[in-house]
Amino acid sequence: MKKLIIPIILLAGLLASCKKDQCEQTQTYWKYTPRYRQISDIVQDVKTMAPTPLKNTGKIFLTGHYILINEYMQGIHVIDNANPSAPLNVAFINIPGNIDMAVKDNILYADCYTALIALNISDPSSPSVANTVYDALPPLYTSFADGSSGVLTGYDSARVTEKVPCASGGPVVWMEGDWAKPMNSAASTGSAMANVPSSPNIAGSTSRFAIDRSALYIVDQSALRVFNISNAAAPISAGSSQIGWNIETIFAYQSHLYIGTSTGMQIFNLNSPFAPQHDATFTHALSCDPVIVQDHYAYVTLHSGTTCNNTVNELEVVDVSNTTAPTIVATYPLHSPRGLSIDGATLFICDGDEGLKVFDAGDVRSISSHSLGQFGAIQSQDVIAWNKTLLMIGTNGLYEYDYSDPQHITPLGHIAIAR
């Protein structure tokens, strides 16, 4: 027994010595505390306000003679474009957590964090929430979110100084990689959107919302979600399906969906509109990917970026006359292309900080040889071409161009970003 007692006494002494010699250090770091709200409370903030300056613009949508411009994570600017030479910022629809939108029959569909909001915009000075579909969409932040606490809407930051054990390695500081800049009623304007025609209703090429007849389609990072909008003011979830990863954009054309992903373009037929069926996948290099389609061709821009982890920057033209067997037709190098639009033979491409580039795409095998012009010094993001007027959104605001003569495209109006 004595041989056992001595080691135990020595061990106790060593532990006491370690405890006495234990040190602490002072560290200062940023602490991020998650901020939660119940979605039922968030949607109560949806309301129309007086016009506010464009600051951090996102998606763009044309409905009638009005332009809707997303203010990232905050809501939607309403622009009266009856005179494209002098567009008027007439109202702001406050929608927390908003990124995307679509319109059918004067009903605006917009995401509000995890909810899908249907708003009647017959009069944008006083839009009314016609319906809300709760839990329609996945949360924006998932890695560290506590779903039982509500919707994670962002983080509160604070500079913290505290003492920690020397051996602790210091505090773990983290923040969501997909952080978004995550609001009071004001007097509304008197502008009205009455008698807005059912056409045009056109989304930009970077949209995640698409409408075909009586269905609204929404893509997130991995799923295709379908909503029945036979009654436009009362969307009903019709189900969802997992279609892969890194889904980015969606484009509806002639009873088909063309879905852009970071690795390719997926094609779905809408023979059963509430149950889209996969036709084919066209694979390309790992890169970010908006898609548009006209006649027999899909136009795909690939660009490098922090979320795409590649250096491919080009335009691909894909023959989709047989949607079950798409084939590459031509590839053209570009600087850093984003959104694009086409009207007849006139192709518009937003090419990053090289600005807007315009091509005659009458011969898809020689597009780069038929440049119609370039508008540089504009960080362009997305475009909509319709009725000989081009709408372009970028980091410097909204630009409009008259392309009635594609050989002599002329600038029209401009609404600048507030600095």
Image (cartoon, rainbow, N blue to C red):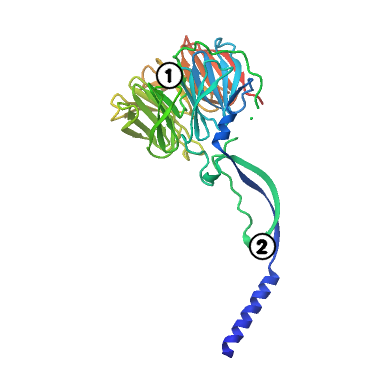
Residue at 57% from the left image edge and 36% from the top image edge: 180
Proximity of marks 2 and 1: CB atoms separated by less than 8 Å: no
> Residue 364, how many percent across, how many down?
36, 21
Above or below residue 124? Residue 251 is below
Above or below residue 184? Residue 165 is below
Which label's residue is closer to the chain start, 2 or 1? 2
Q: Residues within 10 Å of mark 2 (few under 14, many from 20)?
A: few
Quarter of the N terminus within the rendering = bottom right
- Residue type pointed to by label 2: Cys
Label 2 or label 1, whichever lies nearer to me, is 2
Q: Residues within 10 Å of mark 1 (few under 14, many from 20)?
A: many
Above or below residue 221? Residue 62 is above
Residue 133 in the figure: left or right of residue 43: left
Q: CA distance from mark 2 to mark 1?
A: 62 Å
Q: Is residue 350 visible?
A: no
Residue 270 in the figure: left or right of residue 190: left
Element type at mark 1 = strand
User: Residue 91 bears which disc, if any?
Assistant: none
Element type at mark 2 = helix
Q: How many marks?
A: 2
For disc 2, the marked residue is 166
> Residue 360, how many percent across, how many down?
42, 17
Decide which of 251, 230 is in the foreground and name it.
230
> Residue 338, how many percent across, how many down?
48, 28
Quarter of the C terminus within the rendering = top right
- Residue type pointed to by label 1: Ile
For disc 1, the marked residue is 342
Q: Is residue 197 visible?
A: yes
> Residue 19, how many percent across, how many down?
67, 71
Tell me the quarter of the picture where residue 57 sits. Answer: top right
Tell me the quarter of the picture where residue 302 sits. Answer: top left
Residue at 57% from the left image edge and 86% from the top image edge: 4
